[in-house]
Image: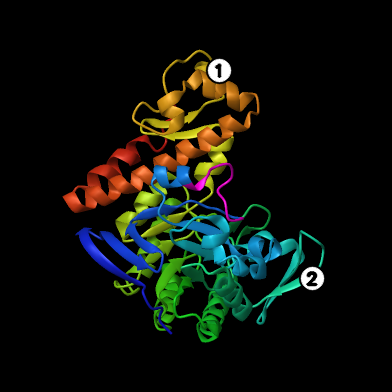
């Protein structure tokens, strides 16, 4: 099944980087773009109007957490995620597949799906590929994701994950993808398949070929940013993208730093998400046009300058580094909110600049500019 009212049109290219428009039932998405993570249906501490003003076009929510509370039935009765949250633009829901990794200590993974103990009430729950699709159809997101098995490439406790384990997880993800495609009922919801395969270009290519054959509306690259090096990641992404159909959106899941996003854009990726900008912001780490800045450092105690002179977000427009440092060090919610909103604004503006650079044929210059400041600490 393919979704109705959903499609991608490429409007400019620069090397492998591409500028495109994705049409959805709740409006278009100009890509490449970043999706703020609204795990429980909200970006912590930031309202919908602020997100829109920062340049957000589409938000990401987590199926597992919304299933736990308030439940997909409640959300469905309130006009789905769009009516429930008041965000009327597009939504993407993650299937909960990442919880396969993060809840591994209390989860059992087998061919049927994932059985785990609820962190909310201690009950045993089962998430199958079919159930993940049904929950997301009830939530009413514009884009749903298949259930996948995501293994860390390198684990701090056990070292490098064995290649055969990565391959088995990839093969299971493909079988789950086939079941997910067969379980679809809504024609107004796109579903993306997920390419796995760890850091192996050969496995990534094989997974991409098999996933593409299932005729999903778009494709995601999962299981990266979990222990591989940057060169390994770039090779894995490029191996998959070379065989994915060019007429479908490409989504790089869960990464990360600004330079990681531009590495993805350079390879032809359209969509990105990560908790890094908001989580780091709440801890005082700011991404700026001149490098990263830990606002809690003593050097900024009496600094009257804005956090980023080139940014027009509320934190940079209205406040000094000294004041933001004071708020963060005092544990004031306003400080954490302003810092998180600043980082989101930086990410969203960076990908707006990427779109403009692709159209102008100068994406390589932008990539090099961000590369030059990626390790700079202010």
Residue at (37% x, 32% y) in the render: 312
N-terminal label among 1 and 2: 2
Mark 1 vs 2: CB contact within 8 A: no
Residue at (48% x, 33% y) in the render: 286
Give the structural element (helix, strand or loop) at label 2.
strand
Image side of residue 369 versus residue 285, left or right? left
| Image quadrant where residue 258 sits | top left
Position of residue 180 relative to residue 90, above or below, is below
Q: Does the magenta stretch include residue 67?
A: no
x%, y% of residue 203?
Answer: 46, 73
Give the structural element (helix, strand or loop) at label 1.
helix
Position of residue 246 relative to residue 237, above or below, is below
- Residue marked by disc 2: 124
Image side of residue 157 versus residue 225, left or right? right
Extreme-left residue of the structure: 360
x%, y% of residue 227?
Answer: 54, 54
Residue at (51% x, 61% y) in the render: 82
| Image quadrant where residue 122 sits | bottom right
Task: Classify mark 1: residues with Cα within 10 Å, few (<14), some (14-19) or many (20+).
Answer: few
Magenta stretch: give its range.
40-48
- Residue marked by disc 1: 298
Task: Classify mark 2: residues with Cα within 10 Å, few (<14), some (14-19) or many (20+).
Answer: few
Residue 361 in view? no
Extreme-right residue of the structure: 122
Q: Looking at the figure, which quarter contains the N terminus?
A: bottom left
| Image quadrant where residue 235 sits | bottom left
Q: What type of secondary structure mainly makes up the magenta span?
A: loop
Position of residue 139 relative to residue 155, above or below, is below
Question: What is the CA distance from the residue labelled 1 to the residue labelled 2?
Answer: 48 Å
Residue at (49% x, 80% y) in the render: 186
For discs 1 and 2, the disc positioned in front in the rendered view: 2
């Amino acid at each position: 099944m393919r979704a109705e009212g959903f499609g991608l049109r490429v409007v400019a290219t620069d090397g492998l980087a591409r500028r495109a428009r994705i049409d959805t039932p709740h409006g278009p998405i100009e890509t490449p773009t970043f999706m703020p993570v609204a795990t429980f249906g909200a970006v912590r501490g930031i309202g919908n109007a602020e997100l829109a003003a920062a340049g957000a076009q589409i938000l990401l929510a987590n199926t597992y957490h919304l299933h736990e509370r308030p439940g997909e039935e409640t959300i469905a009765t309130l006009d789905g995620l769009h009516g429930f949250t008041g965000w009327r633009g597009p939504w993407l829901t993650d299937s909960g597949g990442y919880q396969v990794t993060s809840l591994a200590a209390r989860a059992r993974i087998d061919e049927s799906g994932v059985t785990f103990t609820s962190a909310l009430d201690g009950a045993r729950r089962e998430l199958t590929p079919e159930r993940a699709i049904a929950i997301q159809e009830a939530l009413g997101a514009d884009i749903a994701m298949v259930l996948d098995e995501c293994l860390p490439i390198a684990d701090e406790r056990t070292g490098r994950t064995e290649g055969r384990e990565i391959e088995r997880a990839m093969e299971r993800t493909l079988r789950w993808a086939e079941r997910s495609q067969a379980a679809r009922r809504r024609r107004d919801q796109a579903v993306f398949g997920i390419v796995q395969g760890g850091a192996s270009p050969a496995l990534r290519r094989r997974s991409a070929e098999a996933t593409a054959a299932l005729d999903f509306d778009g494709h995601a690259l999962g299981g990266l940013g979990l222990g591989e090096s940057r060169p390994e990641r770039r090779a894995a992404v490029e191996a998959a993208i070379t065989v994915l159909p060019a007429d479908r959106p490409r989504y790089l899941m869960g990464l990360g730093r600004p330079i990681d996003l531009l590495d993805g854009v350079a390879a032809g990726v359209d969509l990105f998400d990560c908790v890094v900008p908001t989580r780091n912001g709440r801890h005082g780490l700011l991404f700026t046009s001149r490098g990263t800045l830990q606002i809690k450092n003593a050097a900024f105690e009496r600094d009257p300058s804005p956090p980023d002179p080139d940014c027009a977000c509320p934190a940079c427009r209205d406040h000094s580094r000294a004041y933001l440092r004071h708020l963060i060090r005092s544990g004031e919610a306003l400080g954490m909110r302003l810092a998180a909103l600043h980082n989101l604004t930086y990410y969203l503006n960076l990908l707006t600049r990427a779109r403009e650079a692709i159209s102008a044929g100068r994406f390589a210059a932008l990539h090099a500019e961000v590369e030059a400041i990626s390790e700079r600490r202010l």
